[in-house]
Amino acid sequence: MSVDTRRLHAERVRTERKARGWDKPEMARQLARSAGDARGSLPDYECLLTYVKRWERGTVGISERYRLLYCRAFDMAEEDLFPDPENTTAKQSSLVDTGKSVVSETIEFAAWLEQSNVGDSAIEMLRENSRRLSYEYPRRPPLDVMADTEVLQNGVATILRSGRQRINQTKALLEVSAELLALLTLLAGDVGRYRVAGACGRTAWTCAEEADSDFARALVLIAQSKTARWEKDFAEAANLAGKGLELSPAGPEKVLLAVSKATALKSLGDLERARCALVAADGARDEIASLDEDATAWSCPRARQATYALQVHLGARDPGAMLRAAETADGAWADGDPWVYGTWAQVRIGAALAHLLNGDPEGAQAELTSVFEIGPAFRVTTISGRMKAIGRGLEDRRYRASDTATTLREQIRRFRLESLDAREGRTREVR
């Protein structure tokens, strides 16, 4: 065995031993264990330890017998642990002959970097479909939109999981996924599925963080704030909306975050800060370049903004201000602002509550007549919860002798029995 071979083998066994955290005495013990039933034919421990030291210095070569024991101890093939220096040199010198030059390896690496299981046009199509669903959110039955959103989100998740994309494509897909999961958070809350809403919200935030998108973060915080409000965690709802205000770029989303914060603060009894948040919403609206705003899950046209103001005025028990907010919404629709059933229903319910504060159940009945006609598929938690508030108001002792109040209480009871959150509750009971 040549000197070069002894030195190479010495370096190899020394490197592998240290990689495993073994000292030389442990190496001797491992060699003995590797002999198995033939252990008795080996020299004693002290002699084996002396061999290990000599082999690692390269003063003597390692015989075939001990090379096999080393291979068992390290769980390695003999050609990997004890390579032939001449063959190694030959392999290195043959790189150019086999075409594996630095240039070709670099070209192959660049080609791998450009590989993707999705095209830019496909990502844009997914983004457009996500925005279409947010547009349909206030217009179609929530469970239908929820089903379509789940299908699209599963498709995006499959693309992300099943292959690789370029870095900018992965971030774009994560942003789309954050938007879809935020929309699912809203939808799940609308039908009373709060555990689902919580899970979707947390995953949406992870996607937004990985995408490093403030726009996506703002959408997620809108959805999480609404979920916290419906779960009566008003402090968290205000905190989430405030966090969204700090990072949201100028746009309708910022208006929605401001009014969301206002209603959460109202529920905490902090009317002064709630009014300040309404002023902030007006300021955010002034930052929007175009006043031609469509109604989506994430927008806040003037009529929708008025419903939040109406809630703050309800907290202040100011029926005059509530009715003025309702008039603002009606005026916005008359001017051509987009009409959607959910916002309209909340305006009518808010106006009905104002009439009850004024001691006018007949005025409340006039506001609610059309609301009772909303089909069960559209009776989301927001509408059902507001109707419940009217029912509580009708229990005031001044309405005990009112036939109108009695009729309204029964109509509200029947209306809420077929609401989406009530149906969800009955489903859970069956399960």
Image: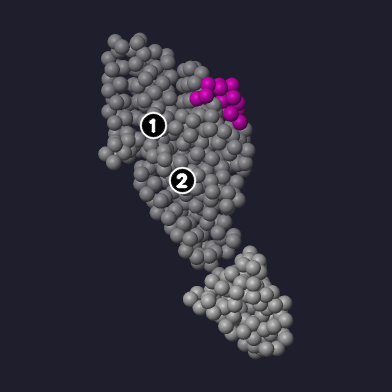
Quadrant hosting residue 17: bottom right
Amino acid bearing label 2: Cys
Using a 10 Å C-alpha cutoff, classify the residue at mark 1 as few (fewer than 14 neighbours), some (14 to 19) or many (20 or more).
many
Q: Closer to the camera: disc 1 or disc 2?
A: 2
Q: Residue at x 27, y 28 (%)?
A: 414
Which corner quadrant holds the C terminus? Answer: top left
Viewer-closest of 286 and 197: 197
**What is the chief secondary structure element of the magenta stretch?**
helix
Circle 2 sits in a helix, a strand or a loop, which is it?
helix
Asked if the residue at tag 2 contacts the one at tag 1, i.e. Cβ–Cβ closer than 8 Å, the answer is: no
Which comes sooner in the sequence, label 1 or label 2?
2
Q: Residue at x 59, y 81 (%)?
A: 67
Q: Which residues are magenta?
A: 266-280
* Residue 154 horizontal/vertical position (percent): 43, 55
Circle 1 sits in a helix, a strand or a loop, which is it?
helix
Using a 10 Å C-alpha cutoff, classify the residue at mark 2 as few (fewer than 14 neighbours), some (14 to 19) or many (20 or more).
many
Q: Is residue 371 above or below residue 201?
A: above
Say the numbered circle drawn on residue 148.
none
Q: Residue at x 47, y 48 (%)?
A: 181
Check disc 2 and report the residue beneath it: 200
Amino acid bearing label 1: Ile
* Residue 313 horizontal/vertical position (percent): 50, 21
Is residue 225 inside the magenta stretch?
no
Check disc 1 and report the residue beneath it: 383
Quadrant hosting residue 185: top left
Is residue 277 inside the magenta stretch?
yes
